[in-house]
Image (cartoon, rainbow, N blue to C red):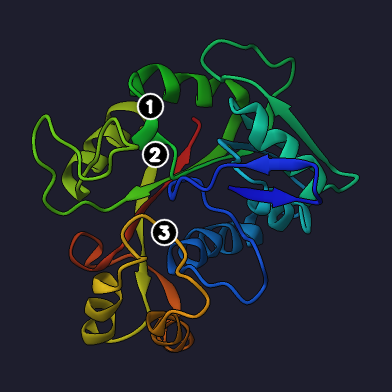
Amino acid sequence: MIVFCNQIEISDTGERILPTQKDEVSIVFSRHKFAYEYVQQFVENKTVIDVGCGTGYGCKILAEKATIVYGIDHDKEAISYCKQKYPAPNITYIEMDINSTVLDRQFDIATAFQVIEHIQNLSKFIERLKQIVKPNGVIFISTPNVKQPQKGKVQNPFHFNEMNYVQFRKLISDNFSSFEILGVAYGTSNRIRHLLGKLPFYKWGKRLNRKSKFKKIAVHALDLTSFTIINSQVEEKSADLLAVCHNT
């Protein structure tokens, strides 16, 4: 359990990423944060909605360039955390379920990062994304690249569905006529990437105890690890799949 300002308590489940004390490290958090940093270049003077905004760090990144940012999440606890941790004059946080609540406006850009794996009705979810984005707007969707998903089973207990590149591409192509599939990849050697995957905290993004000997290894590994966007060998090399979809 994370306590913020002695007022907001939010459960650290290992799935919802929490940027806590500044000396704590999570490679999963860094990977998620990188996606927002990449998209930031496209949002200048744009209106943006972050669907499934979680704890709000992504909204804060987007709001540095965007005119208006809406962060929506169905979790009341998360929205309370966002409002205290990442307030800004151009950010509005709303507790809502996109599938059951109608917004009275449209946006230039929508982001839905690490969200679709938690959604049961994907077709309905994507249709709602298209409805809240202006014609010719852009929708960014990311999900983990699960290279060997098992039919009817998920590796992460927080997920309803997990996809590999082929499955993700089909989902996107079934719903958009104009799109590109990119990848978020580790900008290091396969050896380092393999090491990171074996660290105990990596699998679900849980932080290690500060005094753990693995913590020092993790910090060193993170220093050696950067991230990059790739548009080739996406299926083989990406940790996350990132779709750039045009709402035509």
Q: For residue 67, say whether it is visible.
A: no
Residue 28 sits above or below residue 10 on the image: below
What type is the residue that disc 2 sits on? Ser
Q: Mark 1 and mark 3: span between their CA atoms?
A: 20 Å
Q: Between disc 1 and disc 2, whose residue precedes?
A: 1
Q: Earlier in the sequence, mark 2 or mark 3?
A: 2
Q: Is residue 166 left or right of residue 79?
A: left
Q: Nearer the viewer, residue 114 or 202?
A: 202
Residue at the extreme right: 89
Residue placed under numbered mark 1 in the picture: 119
Closer mark to the observer between disc 2 and disc 3: 3
Q: Horizontally, is 121 left or right of 161 in the view?
A: right
Look at 64% across and 11% down and name the residue there. Answer: 102
Of residue 28 and residue 58, the one placed in the foreground of this image is 28
Name which residue lies at 27% across and 33% down.
171
Residue under the image location 86 percent in, 43 percent down: 90
Residue drawn at 67 percent across, 72 percent down: 22
Any part of residue 87 in sight: yes
Q: Give the amino acid at mark 3.
A: Gly
Q: Position of residue 161 (x, y in %)?
A: 26, 33
Image quadrant where residue 7 sits? top right
Quadrant for residue 73, please give it. Answer: top right
Q: CA distance from mark 1 to mark 2?
A: 23 Å
Residue 112, position as x, y percentages in the image: 51, 40
| Numbered mark located on residue 143 in the image | none
Most foreground residue, 92 or 154: 154
The residue carrying mark 2 is 178
Q: Contact, CB < 8 Å: mark 1 with mark 2? A: no
- Where is residue 227? Give x, y as percent: 44, 74
| Location of mark 3 (residue) | 205
Q: Residues within 10 Å of mark 3 (few under 14, many from 20)?
A: many
| Earlier sequence position, callout 1 versus callout 3 | 1
